[in-house]
Structures are given as C-alpha cells and as structure tokens.
C-alpha cells in the first residue's frame, strides 16, 4: 500500500457498512473498489454488524429519552462513532496501516468521540451524549459499559527508551463488565475498575477500584445566602 489514501473511499466504506448493518434505514452502497482491504476484513462484517446492534440496544436500555430504535440509528453519535471504531479495530488487528486511525479520526471530527482503533471494547457498549469522550490505545473495556460525555480513559505517564522515545506499553485503564462512568471523569493509568462499579462525575481516578463499588466526590457544602439589610 502506498502512502495515499482517498478520504472519499473511507467515507464510502462507512456508507457501505451502514447499508449492510441497517438496511431498513440506510440505502445500499457498493464497496469502494479502489480501497484495497483484505478478504479477512469482509469476512468479519457480520460480526461487526452484530456488535453494532448490541451497541444500539445498549442505548435503548440506558437512555429514557430514546423513543425508538430508529432514533438511535439515525441521530445518535454512538452508532456513527462505533461503526468507524469497530471497522477500524478489525483492520488494526489485521495489520492494515494508517486506515484504522484515519477511520476513527473521521468519527472524532464529527462526533467529538475519540477512540483509538487498538482499544478493546466489548459488546453492548453505550456512550451517552458523547462529546469529549477519549479512549486510549491500550484501554480494555468489558461488556455492558456506559460512558457519559467528557470521560477520559487515558495514560497517567509514559516510559521512555534509551533514545528518548516513548515506549508503547499498556498504560490505559481496564473497565470490567457493567461499569458506568459519569461525565467529565478522568481515569488514568493501567488501573482496573472492577465489574458492576459506578464512578461518579468530575472525578480524577488513578487507582484500582474493587468490584461492586461506588466512587463519589465528597458531598458539596450548601450554604443559604443571607439577605443584605439596608440601612
């Protein structure tokens, strides 16, 4: 593969996948003939379709504002971001260069959801609202996980080799099954958040959390304003 990748071909790939996954909502679009992808990728499209449908189901079960399945498919950023990510992840595992990252950056630019194609994400994944969500390269996310807007699954620090280059080692969080993380929380480093845990909003978390936990900020202090008396 040479260094040139036509963005229009990547967009056509996504349109093709949308038509394959949601034929009742998106028109059929042929495969991009000039985008040479391995046969193994096309063999994985049924599994991509299955996973994306579990993600749509996860939104239906976690957002009371949803009126029907079609609303999620046609208007929620999750569906768009996850088609890009799940296709990119398969291509990443197949060793295809550049295209996986380009795909996820297309979704990032439109939705504000930034998922590295190497991250591992299980089924029934829900991102509510989505803006500002960041999921790093070595993050591992189980099944039935919910993230809200502004959540960062990032690295705490890096290690460097003798030449001063950062070393690509596991450095992002592991979220086990049935974890919920509320808005504007940062979970950093190779820490594990145990299954069935709820992490509240606006928290900076850099340590392991056992299963079946609730992580909250201290309760805010509320003071009643005293009326100013005039002379």
Image (spheres, rainbow, N blue to C red):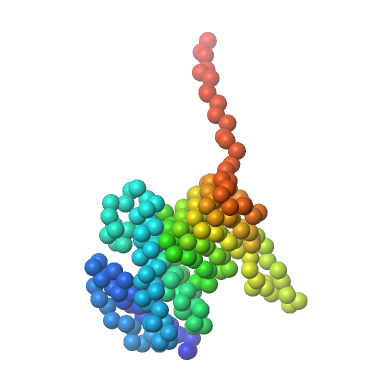
Query: Which of 52 and 108 lies nearest the eye of the viewer?
Result: 52
Q: Image height check: is 20 above or below 224?
A: below
* Residue 109: % across, % down: 43, 65
Does residue 108 appear anywhere in the picture?
A: yes
What residue is rendered at 52% in x and 63% in y?
141
Q: How many marks?
A: 0
Q: Image height check: is 52 above or below 220?
A: below
Most extreme residue toward the right is 162
* Residue 177: % across, % down: 51, 58
What residue is rendered at 61% in x and 58% in y?
192
* Residue 160: % across, % down: 71, 71
Query: Which of 215 and 128 lies nearest the eye of the viewer?
Result: 215
Query: Which of 7 and 188 lies nearest the eye of the viewer?
Result: 188
What residue is rendered at 57% in x and 48% in y?
213
Q: Is residue 165 left or right of residue 12?
A: right
What residue is rendered at 58% in x and 31% in y?
221
Q: Image height check: is 18 above or below 156?
A: below
Q: Is residue 156 left or right of residue 66?
A: right
Does residue 136 appear anywhere in the picture?
A: no
* Residue 4: % across, % down: 45, 85
Q: Image height check: is 228 above or below 145?
A: above
Q: Is residue 151 left or right of residue 160?
A: left
Most extreme residue toward the top is 231
């Amino acid at each position: 593969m040479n260094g040139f990748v036509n963005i229009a071909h990547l967009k056509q790939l996504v349109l093709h996948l949308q038509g394959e996954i949601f034929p009742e909502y998106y028109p059929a679009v042929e495969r991009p003939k000039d985008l040479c992808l391995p046969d193994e990728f096309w063999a994985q499209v049924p599994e991509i379709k299955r996973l994306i449908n579990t993600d749509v189901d996860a939104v239906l079960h976690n957002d009371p504002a949803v009126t029907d399945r079609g609303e999620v498919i046609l208007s929620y950023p999750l569906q768009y971001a996850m088609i890009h990510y799940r296709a990119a992840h398969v291509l990443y595992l197949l060793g295809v260069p550049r295209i996986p990252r380009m795909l996820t950056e297309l979704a990032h630019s439109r939705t504000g959801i930034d998922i590295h194609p190497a991250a591992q994400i299980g089924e029934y994944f829900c991102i509510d609202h989505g803006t500002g969500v960041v999921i790093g390269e070595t993050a591992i996310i189980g099944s039935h996980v919910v993230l809200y807007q502004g959540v960062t699954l990032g690295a705490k620090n890096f290690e460097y080799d003798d030449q001063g280059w950062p070393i690509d080692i596991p450095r992002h969080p592991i979220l086990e099954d049935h974890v919920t993380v509320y808005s504007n929380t940062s979970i950093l480093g190779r820490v594990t958040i145990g299954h069935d845990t709820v992490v509240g909003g606006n928290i900076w978390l850099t340590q392991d959390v056992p299963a079946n936990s609730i992580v909250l900020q201290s309760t805010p202090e509320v003071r009643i304003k005293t009326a100013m008396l005039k002379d």
